[in-house]
Amino acid sequence: MVPNPPRDMPRITPHLFYDDVAAAIDWLVKAFGFEVRLRMTDNDGAVVHGDLEVADSLVMVGLASESPSRGTPRSLGGKVSQRLYIFVDDVESHYERAKSAGAKITSELAEQFYGDRVYECMDPEGHRWKFAQHIRDVDSRTLKRPS
Protein backbone atom coordinates (compact mmCIF):
# COMPACT_ATOMS: atom_id res chain seq x y z
CA MET A 1 0.00 0.00 0.00
CA VAL A 2 1.34 3.45 -0.88
CA PRO A 3 1.50 6.15 1.83
CA ASN A 4 -1.06 8.93 1.82
CA PRO A 5 0.11 11.62 1.42
CA PRO A 6 3.26 10.60 -0.44
CA ARG A 7 6.41 10.64 1.72
CA ASP A 8 7.67 13.90 0.24
CA MET A 9 4.39 15.84 0.51
CA PRO A 10 2.88 17.72 3.45
CA ARG A 11 -0.72 16.96 4.38
CA ILE A 12 -1.84 20.52 3.50
CA THR A 13 -0.35 22.26 0.47
CA PRO A 14 -1.51 25.68 -0.76
CA HIS A 15 -2.08 25.86 -4.54
CA LEU A 16 -2.02 29.35 -6.05
CA PHE A 17 -3.07 30.23 -9.58
CA TYR A 18 -1.16 32.54 -11.90
CA ASP A 19 -1.61 33.81 -15.45
CA ASP A 20 2.11 33.31 -16.16
CA VAL A 21 3.35 30.33 -14.15
CA ALA A 22 6.92 30.47 -15.49
CA ALA A 23 7.29 34.13 -14.53
CA ALA A 24 5.67 33.47 -11.15
CA ILE A 25 8.10 30.65 -10.37
CA ASP A 26 11.11 32.74 -11.37
CA TRP A 27 9.90 35.72 -9.32
CA LEU A 28 9.05 33.66 -6.21
CA VAL A 29 12.50 32.05 -6.30
CA LYS A 30 14.20 35.44 -6.70
CA ALA A 31 12.07 37.38 -4.21
CA PHE A 32 11.39 34.82 -1.50
CA GLY A 33 14.18 32.28 -1.91
CA PHE A 34 11.93 29.34 -2.72
CA GLU A 35 13.52 26.33 -4.40
CA VAL A 36 11.96 24.64 -7.40
CA ARG A 37 11.09 21.00 -6.75
CA LEU A 38 9.05 20.54 -9.93
CA ARG A 39 8.44 22.59 -13.08
CA MET A 40 5.80 20.93 -15.29
CA THR A 41 5.18 21.86 -18.92
CA ASP A 42 2.43 21.08 -21.40
CA ASN A 43 2.98 19.48 -24.82
CA ASP A 44 3.99 22.86 -26.26
CA GLY A 45 6.63 23.44 -23.58
CA ALA A 46 4.71 26.12 -21.66
CA VAL A 47 5.08 25.96 -17.87
CA VAL A 48 1.69 25.07 -16.37
CA HIS A 49 2.57 23.94 -12.83
CA GLY A 50 5.31 24.17 -10.24
CA ASP A 51 6.09 22.87 -6.77
CA LEU A 52 8.17 25.29 -4.71
CA GLU A 53 9.87 24.38 -1.44
CA VAL A 54 10.63 26.57 1.52
CA ALA A 55 12.30 24.78 4.45
CA ASP A 56 9.94 21.92 5.37
CA SER A 57 6.95 23.26 3.40
CA LEU A 58 5.63 23.33 -0.13
CA VAL A 59 3.59 25.72 -2.28
CA MET A 60 2.10 24.68 -5.61
CA VAL A 61 1.56 27.16 -8.42
CA GLY A 62 -0.67 26.46 -11.38
CA LEU A 63 -2.13 28.02 -14.49
CA ALA A 64 -5.28 30.04 -13.85
CA SER A 65 -6.60 29.63 -17.40
CA GLU A 66 -6.85 25.83 -17.15
CA SER A 67 -10.30 26.16 -15.57
CA PRO A 68 -13.02 28.81 -15.77
CA SER A 69 -13.41 28.55 -11.98
CA ARG A 70 -9.85 29.82 -11.39
CA GLY A 71 -8.54 33.34 -11.23
CA THR A 72 -5.70 35.41 -9.87
CA PRO A 73 -6.15 38.28 -7.44
CA ARG A 74 -5.25 40.62 -10.30
CA SER A 75 -7.96 39.13 -12.55
CA LEU A 76 -10.47 39.33 -9.68
CA GLY A 77 -9.98 43.05 -9.15
CA GLY A 78 -7.40 42.69 -6.39
CA LYS A 79 -9.65 40.82 -3.99
CA VAL A 80 -8.18 37.88 -2.11
CA SER A 81 -9.63 35.29 0.21
CA GLN A 82 -6.31 34.05 1.55
CA ARG A 83 -2.84 35.05 2.62
CA LEU A 84 0.07 32.71 3.21
CA TYR A 85 1.89 33.02 6.57
CA ILE A 86 5.44 31.73 6.33
CA PHE A 87 8.12 31.52 9.01
CA VAL A 88 11.66 32.34 7.89
CA ASP A 89 14.91 32.24 9.85
CA ASP A 90 15.98 35.85 9.19
CA VAL A 91 12.97 38.07 8.48
CA GLU A 92 15.13 41.22 8.15
CA SER A 93 17.19 39.87 5.25
CA HIS A 94 14.09 38.20 3.76
CA TYR A 95 12.31 41.57 3.79
CA GLU A 96 15.25 43.25 2.02
CA ARG A 97 15.42 40.47 -0.58
CA ALA A 98 11.69 40.66 -1.35
CA LYS A 99 11.76 44.45 -1.51
CA SER A 100 14.78 44.41 -3.85
CA ALA A 101 12.95 41.97 -6.14
CA GLY A 102 9.98 44.34 -6.42
CA ALA A 103 7.55 42.91 -3.90
CA LYS A 104 4.89 45.47 -3.04
CA ILE A 105 5.24 45.89 0.71
CA THR A 106 1.76 46.26 2.21
CA SER A 107 2.81 46.23 5.86
CA GLU A 108 6.29 47.22 6.98
CA LEU A 109 8.47 44.99 9.10
CA ALA A 110 7.38 45.25 12.74
CA GLU A 111 7.21 43.29 15.98
CA GLN A 112 3.72 42.02 16.79
CA PHE A 113 2.00 41.54 20.16
CA TYR A 114 1.86 37.77 19.61
CA GLY A 115 5.65 37.43 19.52
CA ASP A 116 6.47 37.46 15.81
CA ARG A 117 8.35 40.05 13.76
CA VAL A 118 6.53 40.25 10.42
CA TYR A 119 6.01 42.04 7.15
CA GLU A 120 3.35 41.64 4.48
CA CYS A 121 3.67 41.97 0.72
CA MET A 122 2.05 41.23 -2.63
CA ASP A 123 3.59 39.41 -5.56
CA PRO A 124 3.20 40.74 -9.14
CA GLU A 125 -0.15 38.96 -9.67
CA GLY A 126 -1.61 40.12 -6.35
CA HIS A 127 -1.20 37.12 -4.05
CA ARG A 128 -0.70 38.18 -0.42
CA TRP A 129 2.22 36.87 1.62
CA LYS A 130 3.12 37.40 5.28
CA PHE A 131 6.60 36.44 6.42
CA ALA A 132 7.47 36.07 10.09
CA GLN A 133 10.23 35.24 12.50
CA HIS A 134 9.17 34.13 15.96
CA ILE A 135 11.21 36.26 18.39
CA ARG A 136 9.51 35.74 21.76
CA ASP A 137 7.01 33.43 23.37
CA VAL A 138 3.73 34.90 24.61
CA ASP A 139 1.43 33.20 27.11
CA SER A 140 -1.62 32.26 25.02
CA ARG A 141 -3.83 32.37 28.13
CA THR A 142 -3.27 36.13 28.46
CA LEU A 143 -2.90 37.00 24.78
CA LYS A 144 -5.13 39.89 23.74
CA ARG A 145 -5.22 41.91 20.56
CA PRO A 146 -4.37 45.56 21.25
CA SER A 147 -7.10 48.11 20.57
Image: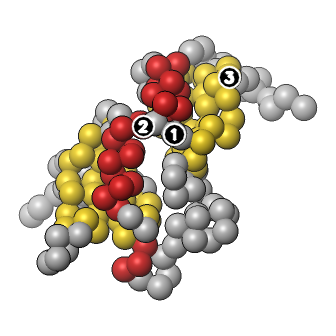
Q: Nearer the viewer, residue 20 or 131?
A: 20
Which dot, 1 or 2, sits closer to the camera? Answer: 1
Q: Which dot, 2 or 3, sits closer to the camera? A: 2
Determine the secondary structure under disc 1. loop
Q: Which mark is residue 102?
A: 1
Q: Give the answer, above or below, for where 97 lies relative to 63.
A: above
Question: Which circle marks residue 115 in the picture?
Answer: none
Position of residue 109 measured from the top left corner of the image (x, y, whole percent): 64, 25
Residue type highlighted by circle 2: Ala
Task: Name above or below for residue 66 compared with residue 72.
Answer: below
Which residue is at a point 28% across and 53% down the rendered structure image?
51
The image quadrant of residue 56 is top left
Which numbered disc, 1 or 3, marks the residue that appears first in the sequence? 1
Q: Helix, strand, or loop for circle 3?
A: strand
Q: Position of residue 7 (x, y in %)?
A: 18, 49
> In this view of the protein, can residue 80 be seen by the observer?
yes
Q: For the N terminus, which image quadrant?
A: bottom left
